[in-house]
Amino acid sequence: QVILLNLLCNNSHSSQRFGFWSSASPQPDGKENNQSGDDSETSLRENDTSINAESTNSSSVDANSSDWMKDTDSKGDLSINDLVKLVAEKEELLKMKHKEIEKMQDKVLRSYADMENVMDRTRREAESSKKFAIQNFAKSLVDVADNLGRAASVVKDSFLKIDTSKDTIGVVPLLKTLLEGVEMTDKQLAEVFKKFGVEKFDPINEQFDPHRHNAAFQISDGSKPPGTVAAVLKLGYMLHDRVIRPAEVGVTEALDSNEAD
């Protein structure tokens, strides 16, 4: 009995102790519960926001993946015939491009050839202009050379006709000096002509050439074939390989049978 009484006393003391702590603990426990509830609501809201963002991203990814799948499915739906046609179209397009490239290459080559021709022609024209720059000047001096030649021949003929035994006034030395001066001038002019490529030519007994000769008259001469230069009135002049003045000549003509007899 004593033991039972002790046990009951102990149980009552323990119950009082537990009752005291249970009655004192509700107030702090309530505040803590309110704070924990607010924290949990905030965390839940943040979780909801992150979940919504993830769902949006996942939906866009799903949309892109679905489009890609549709494209792959549409490509995968091509049959062998469609693929063959597609390859044929690409080959035809490639051939067309090759033809266009060939045309462009041909145009480039033609343009290059034209440019080379223009450059060569320009070079030749420049050389020709430089070569024949004095043509007009030389052509003007040709008549001066002819007059000097005529003067020399006239003075020489006059000198030969004079009788030196009857020369009482001293004409012979004067004519001789004049002849020497004219001949010297004619010779010096011929050297200048030769220095610059101007040369005279005598076409006697040559076959008539309209590019080199100017026929002034015809001569009946059976000793020479028809069309032969039989007489020369004026010598011709050339500047390098170009005729600047054709020679004035007389050309033989064909004889009739009666004249030949």
Image: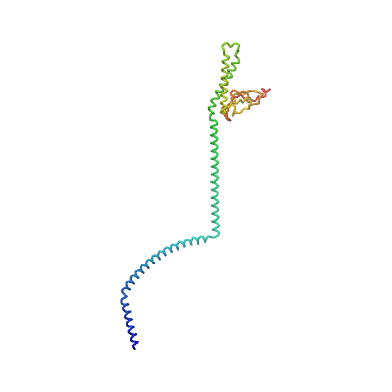
Vertical placement of residue 81 versus 104, above or below: below
Q: Position of residue 69 (x, y in %)?
A: 48, 62
> In the drawing, does residue 31 fall left or right of residue 196?
left
Q: Is residue 237 depicted above or below 30 in this figure?
A: above
Q: How many marks?
A: 0
Q: Residue furthest bottom?
A: 1
From the viewer's perspective, tell me whether residue 127 is left or right of residue 8: right
Q: Residue furthest right?
A: 261
Spot occupied by residue 135 in the image (x, y as percentages of width and height):
54, 28
- Report the quarter where the C terminus lies: top right
For the N terminus, give its image quadrant: bottom left
Compared across the picture, whether 63 is left or right of 166 comes to: left
Decide which of 31, 224 is in the foreground and name it. 31
Q: Position of residue 92 (x, y in %)?
A: 55, 52
Figure colour scheme: rainbow
Q: Nearer the viewer, residue 246 or 1?
A: 1
- Res 14 quadrant in image: bottom left
Picture coordinates of residue 79 (x, y %)?
A: 54, 60
Q: Quadrant of residue 149?
A: top right
* Placement of 117 over or under 210, stated as above or below: below
- Of 189 and 112, nearer the camera is 189
